Every structure is written in C-alpha cells, then in structure tokens.
Image (cartoon, helix red, strand yellow):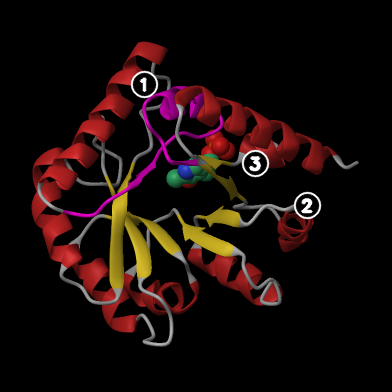
Amino acid sequence: MSMLIQQWQSVRQQCANLAAANGHAVTLIAVSKTFPAADIRTLYEAGQRDFGENYIQEWQQKCTELADLDDLAWHIIGQIQANKSRSVAERAHWVHTVDRAKIARRLSEQRPDTMPPLNVCIEINIAAEANKHGIGADELLPLAQYIATLPRLRLRGLMCVAKADSTRAELTQQFTRMQQLLAKLQTAGLAVDTLSMGMSADMDTAIACGATQVRVGSAIFGRRQ
Ligand SMILES: *Cc1c(COP(=O)(O)O)cnc(C)c1O
C-alpha cells in the first residue's frame, strides 16, 4: 500500500477516534494544495471525498483534470480575489474564507441556479493577528446577517486558523472562543452548524473544542515544498 494511503488511513482513524471520544461527527478535509491531481484521485479511489485547496488557479486545473469524479466535494480555504470568484461560484461546494460582504455578494450572484446554494463559512481572525485574513468578533454578526439574506449562499458557520506556535492552552482558548461565536450566531437565529478549525498540528485540540470539519494537509500528503 502506498505511503499516501497509509498516512491518510492513519489520519482518518485518528479523526474518527477523536470524534467518537468527543461525541460529535467530524468531516476530514484533505488539504491537497501543491500536490498533484493524481494524489487526489488516489485518495478518492480509497474513499476520501472532501478536498481543500488554497490557490484558485491551481485548483481550477485540478478541477478540470478530476471532472469525472462526481461526488468529490471541493472546499476553497484560501483567499478569493474578486476576479476569480466566478469559477469558485460555478465549481466549488464550500468556501471557508468569506470575510467581506463584497465577495459574498459576488459569489451569490454568480452561483448558477442549477446548483444547490454554495456553503460558506466566515473566517475569523481569532487571535487578532495583524497579518492574518478574517474578521474580528465585533464585525461578525452584521456580516453573518447579510450573508443570510443572499439567495444563492448558505451560511454554515465559522472558520479559523489558530495562531502559529500557540501552546495547547492558547489553542484551547482560541477554539473555545470560536465555539462561543458560533453559539452567538445560533442565538441570533441563524441556522449555522459548522466549525471549520484544526489542521495537522492541532486537530486534536480543535475537535475537543467542537470542530465539525478539520483541514489536514501535511499529515496526509507529506511536507509541502
Ligand atoms: C494549508 C492549510 C491547511 C492544512 O495545513 P497542514 O498544517 O498542512 O495540515 C489548513 N487550513 C488552511 C487555511 C491552510 O492554508
């Protein structure tokens, strides 16, 4: 069996064990950025369905190469420039990184009527880092309420990337805050159910704090160049 499949099976098992231990379902998103379409096909054939990509141009190419894989779900987890939003609206299943009204509006306008509404998460800059994408907690409710009015989007929840080199206590603090923000949206009457948080290094802490989707790259595919 290939190294790739072995690593994927190991992460999938870990994820399933953590989900069971914490009593909630967790979707494993295999983050395939920088790795070839052939690797995605290999994992798809082994049973993986959810894949995450950061760079739109790279993703478009893979999307075309893998167009025969019907029920593969593409999760866009990188920034979307306005001039690239159309292909995302036309081909993606999820966007995790919505952080402004303008991009939300474009995605909704460009989402074809023949497709189900595009699932979106709002990205939160959870440790208020200067160089990070995402919005602050104070901006969340207005943006969430705006997205909820857009006919071709379905607001699903929140996403974050934890601060690099956080201790476990700091990770717990950030992920718990995310859980509280999701609860705040639910209290405001929004039907959100998704917390996209946790990567190769912090998936365990994220799941313990309620992550429903983890985005795992290097632990599955190996180190990126
Ligand atoms: C690259 C990336 C991941 C995966 O990171 P790993 O540490 O390789 O698991 C997850 N989320 C986002 C937003 C990323 O850019």
Q: Which x, y percent locates residue 85? A: 37, 74
Q: Does the magenta stretch include residue 88?
A: no
Q: Residue at x 72, y 39 (%)?
A: 8
Magenta range is 190-214
Answer with mark 2 or mark 1, whichever residue precedes in sequence: 2
Answer with mark 3 or mark 2, whichever residue precedes in sequence: 2
Viewer-nearest of labels 2 and 1?
2
For this view, does 109 lie left or right of residue 48? Answer: left
Q: Which x, y percent locates residue 129? A: 26, 33
Location of residue 155 by image quarter: bottom left
For this view, does 219 lie left or right of residue 74? Answer: right
Give the number of the disc on residue 171.
1
Residue of label 3: 224
* Residue 224 appears in the rendering: yes
**Residue at disc 3, CB closer than 8 Å to ligand 1:** yes
Question: How many angstroms separate mark 3 from mark 1 (CA)?
Answer: 23 Å
Type of residue at label 3? Arg
Q: Which residue is drawn at 20% across and 73% down?
A: 150
Q: Which x, y percent locates residue 104? A: 25, 68
Which element type, helix, strand or loop, lies under badge 1?
helix
Location of residue 121 by image quarter: bottom left
Residue of label 2: 46
Question: How many angstroms separate mark 3 from mark 2 (CA)?
Answer: 22 Å
Which element type, helix, strand or loop, lies under badge 2?
helix
Neighbour tally class for label 2: few under 14, some 14-19, many 20 plus, Cα within 10 Å: few
Does residue 195 lie above or below 176 as drawn?
A: below
